[in-house]
Image (spheres, grey):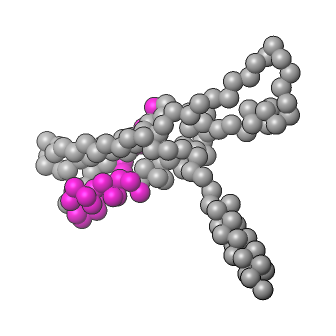
Amino acid sequence: MKLPFLFTLMVVLLSGCISKPDEPFKVADQTLHTRLADNGSKLFAFIVTVEKQARVKLDTRKEISRTEFKMFLNEEHIEDSPALKLALEERAVQLLKTALDEQDYCQQGYDIEEVYWKERKVQLRGQCRD
């Protein structure tokens, strides 16, 4: 009687672990810069940097397995992948909202006017609606 229950419980717990996708990147640093423009409007620049990912190295002097070759082909990096860049941009917008709330900046809302990319960094620039 206990065995079927334990088996069912184990399957449910393991399926929960398996179904959770890993984030394809880890945020290494985030920085919020604020300043007042000459006309008095409040400006911000928010920079999010992701950790560098190790690249799979192939030794061309020896044969590689099919699994190693698939890993090499399927490897994605922020610098190369538009999909990962978009995912990071969306994550940066979420982190920006949290950072602005924590610093009590842009209480009336904000507009992101520019997005810049450089290697493993995304920078969101905008101004407050106050």
Residue occupying image coordinates x 56% and y 34%: 53
Q: Can residue 19 be seen in this view?
A: no
Residue occupying image coordinates x 16% and y 45%: 36
Q: Residue furthest front?
A: 2
Up-down relation of residue 63 to residue 37 (above or below): above
x, y percentage for residue 130? Answer: 20, 60
Does 102 sit left or right of 20 as displayed?
left
Reply yes or no: does residue 114 show up in magenta.
Answer: yes
Q: Is residue 35 visible?
A: yes
x, y percentage for residue 116? Answer: 42, 38
Up-down relation of residue 13 to residue 78 (above or below): below
- Towards the viewer: 76 or 4: 4
Part of the protein shown in magenta? 94-118
Can you tell which quarter of the image residue 124 is in?
top left
x, y percentage for residue 46? Answer: 33, 44
Up-down relation of residue 23 to residue 29 (above or below): below
Does 82 sit left or right of 35 as displayed?
right
